[in-house]
Amino acid sequence: MTQKQTRANDRERHRMHNLNSALDALRSILPVLPEETKLTKIETLRFAHNYIWALTETLRMADQQEHTAGCDASGPGNVVSALWTSATAAPGTDDEFDLKSCQMTSHEGFPHHSNGNI
């Protein structure tokens, strides 16, 4: 193995170590169900995306004072459970939790929210 390849391998190993450390830090602040399950890298990213979206929607709904009867968006039960389901969905599917209907919705590809992001 050449010195150039060795340096490239060291850089890649360092990059992956940093990525894994960042994902571990992210996992440590996400609510996870069941607690003993470690999310994969893609599940962690999907869950974080959906969790941020759900929190944003909860704040938006609170600002608009639109409360749907029968859906306790302020409690973690429905939202976290649904986010867990969406994070661990089969590849190629993208289920997300609709705070207004309190139900999971399925979409092909990635969700398209009003802000145009993933």
Image (cartoon, rainbow, N blue to C red):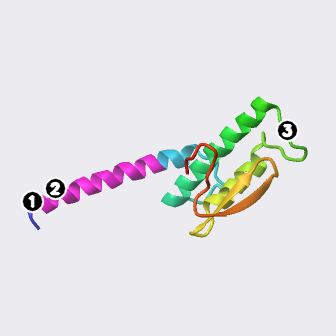
Q: Residue furthest top?
A: 63
Percent from the top left, x then y, of residue 39? 55, 59
Tag 1 residue: 3
Residue type pointed to by label 1 = Gln
Tag 3 residue: 67
What's the mark number on residue 7?
2
Classify residue 88 by image quadrant: bottom right
> Is label 3 or label 1 in front?
3
**Labels 1 & 2 near each other (Cβ < 8 A):** yes
- In the rendered image, residue 15 lying in the magenta stretch gets the answer yes
Residue type pointed to by label 3 = His
Q: Nearer the viewer, residue 100 or 15?
A: 100
**Labels 3 & 1 near each other (Cβ < 8 A):** no
Percent from the top left, x then y, of residue 55? 67, 40
Residue 113 vertical position relative to residue 106 in the rendered view, above or below: above
What's the mark number on residue 72?
none
What is the CA distance from the residue labelled 2 to the residue labelled 3?
57 Å
Residue 110 vertical position relative to residue 100 in the rendered view, above or below: below
Percent from the top left, x then y, of residue 64? 78, 31
Instruction: From the image, give the main secondary structure of the stretch colored magenta.
Output: helix
Q: Residues within 10 Å of mark 1 (few under 14, many from 20)?
A: few
Viewer can see residue 34:
no
Report the magenta residues as a range. Answer: 3-23
Taking the spot 48% from the left edge, 45% from the top edge, the residue there is 25
Viewer can see residue 74:
yes
Q: Residues within 10 Å of mark 3 (few under 14, many from 20)?
A: some
The N terminus lies in quadrant: bottom left
